[in-house]
Amino acid sequence: MTILWRPTGPVELDLVRELEWRAWPPRLPEQPIFYPVLNEDYAIRIARDWNVRHDGAGFVTRFEVETEFLKRYPVQQAGGETILELWVPAEEPAEFNRHLIGEIEVVHEFR
């Protein structure tokens, strides 16, 4: 199993709650990728510095995914050495969700 994090705003978090903390919602048309991140610090920075400014609140979620499944997504370095993401194409969240282990949990909240 691999632990991943996802910075998210209140709208996406509400959708995760509706899915009983067991799945990520489908992407919107303007969202070509779903990008979980590989470290908590990077997720905190996005939730605190971007989501709060744009959505009024930011949340960091943590969840586990089957490691073998994640090998299909090469790690993307989106900036500095620790700014690492996986890019899951918009048409694949349902498949991604089938490989989640346990529940998605909120580990940080910023307002």
Image: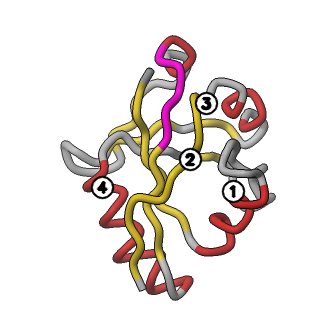
**Which of the 4 image quadrants contains residue 38?**
top left
Q: Are marks 1 and 4 in contact (CB under 8 Å)?
A: no
Callout 4–callout 3 Cβ contact below 8 Å: no
Which residues are the magenta region?
Answer: 63-67
Give the labeled residue for mark 2.
Answer: 104
Q: Say left or right for 76 vs 63.
A: left
In 3D space, how far apart are the residues under numbered discs 4 and 3 (Cα atoms)? 21 Å
Q: Amino acid at mark 3?
A: Leu
- Please name which of the two marks, 4 or 3, marks the residue nearer to the observer: 3
In the rendered image, the quadrant that contains the C terminus is bottom left
Please, what is the three-letter code of the amino acid marked with disc 2?
Ile
Mark sitting earlier along the chain (3/1): 1
Instruction: From the image, give the main secondary structure of the stretch colored magenta.
Output: strand
Disc 3: which residue: 100
Which quadrant holds residue 107?
A: bottom left
The answer to which of 43 and 66 lies nearer the viewer is: 66
Mark 4 = which residue?
Answer: 42
Q: Is residue 64 magenta?
A: yes
Residue type marked 4: Tyr
Measured Cα–Cα span from mark 3 to mark 2 = 9 Å
The residue lying toward the viewer, choosing from 51 and 24, is 24
Residue 89 is labelled as none
Label 1 belongs to which residue?
Answer: 16
What residue is drawn where x is 39% and y is 78%? 110
| Mark 2 or mark 4: whose residue is earlier in sequence | 4
Question: In percent of the image, x 45 and y 24: which residue is there?
Answer: 74
- Dot placed on the residue nearer the N-terminal end, 2 or 1: 1
Answer yes or no: do the residues labelled 3 and 2 have beta carbons within 8 Å?
Answer: yes
Q: How many residues crowd mark 1 within 10 Å: few (<14), some (14–19), many (20+)?
A: some
Q: Earlier in the sequence, mark 4 or mark 3?
A: 4
